[in-house]
Amino acid sequence: MPPGARILVTGAAGFVGSHLRDALRMAFRDAWLIAAIHRRPAMGWDESVPLDLADAAGLAGQLAAIAPDAVVHLGAQANVAQSFKDVAATWEANLTATLNLGAALMQARPACRLLFASTGEIYGLSFQQGVALDENAPLAPGNPYAAAKAAADIALGEMALRGLAVVRMRPLNHVGPGQSEGYAVAAFARQIALIEAGRQAPVMAVGALERWRDFLDVRDVCAAYAQALAQWERLPNGVALNIASGVPRRIGDVLAGLLARSDRVIRVEEAAHALRPNDVIRSLGDAGRAHAMLGWQPMIDWETTLDDVLTDWRARV
């Protein structure tokens, strides 16, 4: 990144945004960090600017005024359960907004670097192969969120052929402090914290526990994003990079790990309403390309992640 680079982040007010802000500050100490805000304020950035990714006609002018050297596109409707409830809004947020952003950058800031936060969910039913998937695995999304993300991922790959400077990052499930209760690990921690605080009966309602997921700490994911920006010139334009631990963890074992951190006796009940349609039993990613191209690997111990998630929810409730 050039000295004094202007880095714009969409979705800056979300779960990943605050962790990415910290990672960018560490990696680019003289950069000017700009939060693109839409509905919610984002704290701790050098500047906040309104940016409406749905405004296809006006977006190029907005970006010309902001003059970013790099954009990290985190903005998305990222909740899988919500994607089933409002499919159209999910496609609008995850595909149309991304297409608008890519087109506006090509028009107004053609030299600007775009780092797209895609997702390992786009592999979907390909995980049924039972092996760690690399970036050449077929995209077979199993829910509206993943389908919209897959479409955006493919579209940006094509736009790279027309001159868009873009890298597509495909992180698998990431967790950490600050995540909302719409995600399994955070939901577990929240219920435990509520029970400890006497605000919930000592009974937990959970979804399917016989699932295996490739979990990452969100701070490791953000470190990968910062490394990609720092090593941009070494990366083939349009490249896709999996960000994965390569370690499958059973959801029931993750819950057991959190329960072991509490001194309360808690009964666990599986709730049918929490089960996801078209769910895959096991997901596992191969991040060999990210290791080779970026030198990236997960650094945060899983036990530390569980400690931090539960500590965060105890403070929040």
Image (cartoon, rainbow, N blue to C red):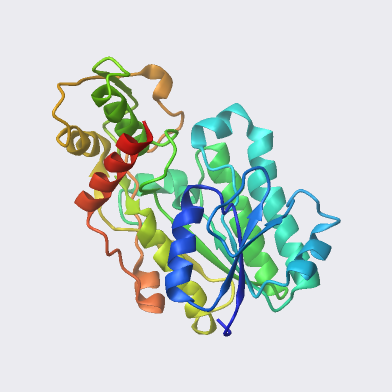
Position of the C terminus by quadrant: top left
The image position of residue 73, as x and y in percent, is 60, 59
Residue visible at 21% across and 36% down in the picture = 258
- Answer above or below: position of 310 versus 289: above
The image position of residue 302, as x and y in percent, is 23, 52
Residue 158 position by quadrant? bottom right
Q: Is residue 138 visible?
A: no
The image position of residue 135, as x and y in percent, is 45, 63
Residue visible at 49% across and 84% down in the picture = 234
Q: Is residue 248 visible?
A: yes
Position of the N terminus by quadrant: bottom right
Label tally: 0
Q: Nearer the viewer, residue 165 or 42?
A: 42
Residue 268 lies left or right of residue 65; in this view the side is left
Residue visible at 20% across and 50% down in the picture = 303
Q: Nearer the viewer, residue 300 or 212?
A: 300
Residue 102 position by quadrant? bottom right
The image position of residue 200, as x and y in percent, is 31, 17
Residue 122 lies left or right of residue 151; in this view the side is left
